[in-house]
Amino acid sequence: MYPTFLVYFAHVSNLYYTLPQLELAKRLVASSFADRVFLSNSGTEANEAAIKFARKFQRFSHPDEKQPPVEFIAFSNCFHGRTMGAVALTSKEHYRSPFEPVMPGVTFLEYGNVQAAKELIQSGKIAAVFVEPIQGEGGIYSATKEFLQALRTACDGTGSLLVFDEVQCGLGRTGHLWAHEAYGINPDIMTLAKPLAGGLPIGAVLVTERVAAAINYGDHGSTFAGGPLVCNAAVAVLDKISEPGFLASVTKKGKNFRELLVKKLGGNSHVREIRGAGLIIGIDLDVPASPLVDACQQSGLLVLTAGKGNVVRLVPPLTITEQELDHAAEILFNCLPVLDKTAKN
Ligand SMILES: *Cc1c(COP(=O)(O)O)cnc(C)c1O
């Protein structure tokens, strides 16, 4: 559909648009709340861009004020990346403290604490609130509708921007195209990355026209971002996710898998909770999860820890089959006794 030189180019100077880039942006806009897209190379870069856009938007919206709102809110157990701005928004001390000073002006509030968030947003100092509708790295915690609605209402009251980081939970992971669709609440900015180009490096910042109006050509940019190769890959990923029945299959596989895990693992005394949505699932343990994660790897199943190290995180490919999920549950079940050994030591 494109001239072949555009399909096969890996890179074109960012002085020029390419058709795959426009096609990707069009698709993202058509399927979301957003009007404009900025492309980056990773999730942390997407959040870094969102930080800059929020600051620029506030300067643009408060032209006569010496001190427009420049501060940020992020939440307990959040993860937004590892560069100096994104890491400043990431709650775990361990990621930040060796590199301080990071970007100042970030307050961490308890995830889900409506009152604390409302009060701080109403101070008028907040440029933007960064929140994951479902926290991945932090331990697979889903926001409540009340919480996201309160953030939306408070931000609307002051002009603070609401940023949803869907780098991990977006693009079909929860069974909805966007995790926030389940809540019926839209952000002003959404960041994406991880699965967007099927394993090639990409990130995206989706914004409303109101936010985009504050950003000028040249305010931000990147040499490799939005290259034709990665954008073609991302369009192919979006094609796959938008096949009829694809998202419904994620919901169904996720539900069956969670029920199977509850049935097989729920009786174990170390398992406190099995939670999640679609194919983002956490198994909350009363002991460190890494012995179980290691034992699973020995048995051919790759899973990950999350939270304070006591959560097993399951984020399989969305194309996984029911049989493969059954096999994964079997391996987890067979490896569980390793937790008794570590608990006794
Ligand atoms: C992984 C992740 C990031 C960082 O993305 P990178 O592509 O690794 O830079 C940001 N936010 C969330 C929610 C993530 O899970």
Image (tube, grey):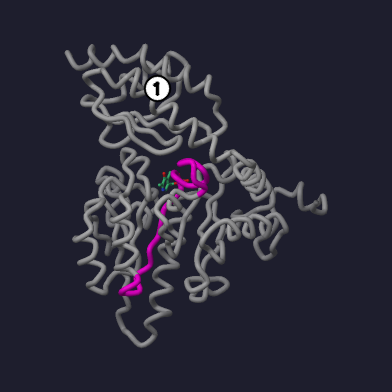
Image quadrant where one finds the C terminus: top left
Q: Which residues are magenta?
A: 156-177
Please tell me whether residue 226 belongs to the stretch shown in magenta: no
Q: Is residue 272 left or right of residue 233?
A: left
The amino acid at mark 1 is: Leu
Q: Hey, which quadrant is residue 139 in on the image?
A: top left
What residue appears at the point 28 percent right and 31 percent down from the top-left corner?
Answer: 309
Residue underneath mark 1: 260
Where's residue 314, x and y in %? 41, 30
Q: Residue furthest left?
A: 344
What residue appears at the point 32 percent right and 71 percent down from the top-left corner?
Answer: 70
Residue 126 vertical placement versus 294 (above, below): below
Where's residue 344, x and y in %? 17, 13
Is 201 or 153 nearer to us in this picture? 153
Please tell me whether residue 173 belongs to the stretch shown in magenta: yes
What residue appears at the point 61 percent right and 54 percent down from the top-left corner?
Answer: 224
Q: Is residue 70 left or right of residue 326?
A: left
Where's residue 68, x and y in %? 32, 78
Q: Hey, which quadrant is residue 53 in on the image?
A: bottom left
Q: Hey, which quadrant is residue 282 in on the image?
A: top left
Q: Principal SS element in the magenta part?
A: loop
Bin the neighbour count of mark 1 within 10 Å (Cα to Cα): few under 14, some 14-19, many 20 and up. Answer: some
Is 172 or 228 nearer to us in this picture? 172
Q: Is residue 149 left or right of residue 110?
A: right
